Amino acid sequence: MAERCAVIGVGQTHYTSKRRDVSIAGLVREAALRALDDAGLTFADIDAVVIGKAPDLFEGIMMPEAYLADALGAAGKPMMRVHTAGSVGGSTALVGAGLIQGGVHDRVLVVAFEKQSESNATWALSTHLPFSSSLVVGAGGYFAPHIREYMRRTGAPEHIGALVAVKDRLNALKNPYAHLRIPGIDRKMVESTPMLWEPIRYLETCPSSDGACALVLSSERAVTGTPAWVHGAAMRSEPIFRAGRDTVNPQAGKDCAADVYQQAGVTDPRRQIDVAEVYVPFSWYEPMWLENLGFVAEGEGWKVTESGATALDGDTPWNASGGVLSSNPIGASGLIRFAEAALQVRGMAGEHQVDGARLALGHAYGGGAQFFAMWIVGRDRP
Amino acid sequence: MRRVAVVAFAQTEHTGHDTGVGEVELILPVINEVKERTGLTRFGFTCSGSCDYLAGAPFSFVSALDALGAWPPISESHVEMDGAWALYEAWVRLQHGDVDTALVYGFGKSSLGDLAEIMTLQLDPYYLAPLGLDRLSFAALQASATGADRKELDEIVRRSRADGRRNPYALDLPEQIPDGFAVEPLKTSDVAPITDGAAAVVLAAGDLAERLCATPAYITGIAHRIEPHYLGMRDLSRSASAADAARAAGVGKAPVEVAELHAQFAHEEVILRQAMELPDDTVINPSGGPLAANPVMATGLIRIGEAARRIHDGTARRTVGHAAGGPCLQHNLVTVLEA
C-alpha cells in the first residue's frame, strides 16, 4: 500500500507575457520560495527536487535542470527532470508525489516553469524529426480540426466556445496571479476578435506566458500547515499515429479518469467533485473534456457549458482560477491546475474559492491529446 | 523497500555513424527483445529517457510510443535525462505496491549533430553558454584538475577498447591509440566515441522477478545526487555527488566484483573509482564502457544493464551500475545489484 501524500505548500508567480526583470533561475526560485513559505519551511527541509517543463526548444536551453539545481537548493540532493509534452506540469506533480507514496522521501519540492518570452513556442512546436511529416501549424492548427469534428458529431452551436472564453476570463478577474485580466470581457468582445484557426478566435485561445509554479509535497508524518491530501493519481499515454484512435474523445483520457476516480472512490464526478481545474487551452476543450472525463454523457458537454453549470457559481465549477485560457506558461500550466485544485480544498483560493470545496480534480493533457495526467485532492485524509 | 530486480536487458548493436534508421526503428528491436525474454506484453509502468536536442526537434519521445504498441493506453512517463533516471523513476513507482512490472528504455543518436556544441546549450544560458565553452573544453578543465598520470589514462583507453572489441554491441575501435589532443590535456582517445544506440530494461517486483528470470539482479541500493552547476563552485578533481550517492546506495557494504561506470572521458573513471571507493580488485567496465560505445541518453542505462547482465549470467554476485549527467559529472546515480 502506498504512503499517503499531501500538498502543504503552493507558490506561483504572477503570470505575464514577459518577465524581463528575472532570469529563468530567478523565476523558478520565486515560485519555490513562495511554496516553501506557504509550508513554513526552507530549502533545508526538502529531500529532493523534481522539475518539469515543456520542450527545451522553448527557451533554447538543453536540460535546464542542470543549471537550475543551484537556484532550487538541489545541490547535494536528488533532482529529476520530467518531460511529457503539455501534460508535463501534471506529470511532474505525479513524479514528486510518487517519491512520497513510494516511501522514498518525506518532503519533495516540485517546480514547473516556462519562460515563453525567451523564444517562440509556435516555431518550436513546428519543427520536426527528419523523414517525418510536419504540419507546421503549432498547437492551434493541430487541435482545430478535432474541435470541428466535435461540433459535427454533437451538433453544437458555434457560440459555445465564446461562452467558455468569457467565463474563464471572468474567473481570472478574481485571481491575482492570472495573466489575462480583461475588464468588460463579454461574448461580443470575443466574437469580434480575429479567427485564428477555424473555429478558434483570438480570445478563445490561451496566451503565451512567463511563469513558474511550485508545490511542497509531504508524507503524512512530515505535514506542516494546511494539507490537501492526494486521493488518487494516474497517468496514461496512447500513440499519436495509431489508426482508429479517437482524437476527439481519447481513450487514454477516459482510462486515466477511470483510474483516478476508482482510487478516490468517485462514481459520479459531476456531483462528487466540487471543483475541477482542467487543461483547456482552447475554449472548446471544456465541453469536449466534460464528456471525456465522464462529467456528462457523450454529446451533452456543450449543453452543460451553455447552461452555465461550469461557472464559479454553477453546480460543477470548472477552472475557477481562469484556467489555461487565462495563464499559460506551458510547462507549468498542468502543475498550476494541480496546484489550484489543492488551493481549493485547502480553502486558500481567495476570491475564486468555491465555497466548501472538499474534493477537487487537477487535469493536464499534452501531445496530440494523447498524454494525460490527473490527480484528485481532498480536504480529508484518505 | 520492496524488492525489485532487473529481469531483462537488451541493447542495440551500437554504431559510430547514422545508419539511416529513425528513433522508433532503433527502439523497436530492443523493446521486442525484452518482451520476448520475459514473456510480458504489458507492463504496469513504462518510463523512458531521451533528449530533444539530439534529434533537433521537440517531443522526440512522442513517436517512441508507436514502438511500444501503447494500446490500450499505458501508464507512462518520460525524463529528459539518461534512461538510468527513467529506471530510477520506475523503481520508485514499483515501491507503491500496486504494479509489479516496469519497462524502461533510453535512446539517442549523437551522430546527427555536433555533440560538443550541443552540450554547450546545457550550460547556464546567461553566464556560461555565451562563453562558448563546449563539452570537450569543460572536460579538459576537469582532466587538468584531476592531474591523472598519462600512462594510467592511456591504459584505461587501451583496456576499454580491447573489452569493447570483445563486446558484440560496442564499437570496434583500433588498438593503436592515436596521439593528439582534443583540448589539452584531453587526448582525442580519452573521449567517448560518437554513437547511435538504444537500450531497454524490464524491472519486476517481489516473487514475480524469479518467475520471469532464473537469476534476477536485485536492486539492493539506488540513489542519486546533483551538485552545483558552476564549475568554479566545485572541486573538479573530486566527485562529491558520486561519493554521496555511492554511500546512500550502500556500495561499500560488501565487495563489488564489477562496476560499470558512466565515464565519458578517461579521467572520469579515475575520479569515479576514487569517489565510490572501489577497491583495486573491482573489474571496471568489462563491457568496454562508454569509451567503447556512448549512445548518449542510453549510456547510463546500459551501465545498469551490463552490471545486471553479470548477475544474470552468473559471473558475478554483486555489481554496481553508475550513470552521470550534466557538465563535469554534475549529477551521479549509483545502483547496487545483487544475486
Image (spheres, rainbow, N blue to C red):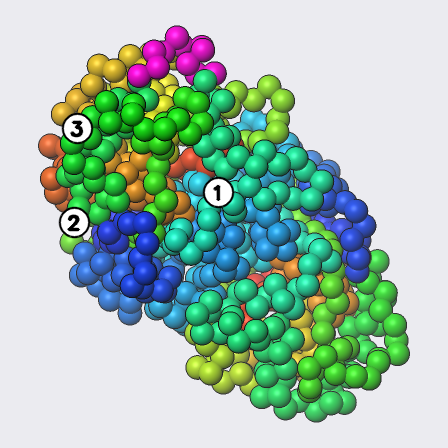
Identify the residue shown where x is 46% and y is 49%.
A120
Q: CA distance from mark 3 to mark 1?
A: 32 Å
Judge whether residue A372 can be spotted in this image. Answer: no
Residue type, numbered disc 1: Thr
Give the residues drawn in magenta, as a range: A149-159
Instruction: Write the residue at 20% across / 37% down.
Output: A182
Displayed quadrant of residue A327: top left
The nearer-to-camera label among 2 and 1 is: 1
Q: Chain of mark 1?
A: A
In magenta stretch: residue B185: no
Q: Secondary structure at mark 1?
A: helix
In this view, the mark in front (3 or 1) = 1
> Could you tell me the amino acid type at mark 2?
Thr
Q: Is residue A245 visible?
A: yes
Which quarter of the rendering shows the C terminus of chain A? top left
Q: Earlier in the sequence, mark 2 or mark 3?
A: 2
Q: How many residues crowd mark 1 within 10 Å: few (<14), some (14–19), many (20+)?
A: some
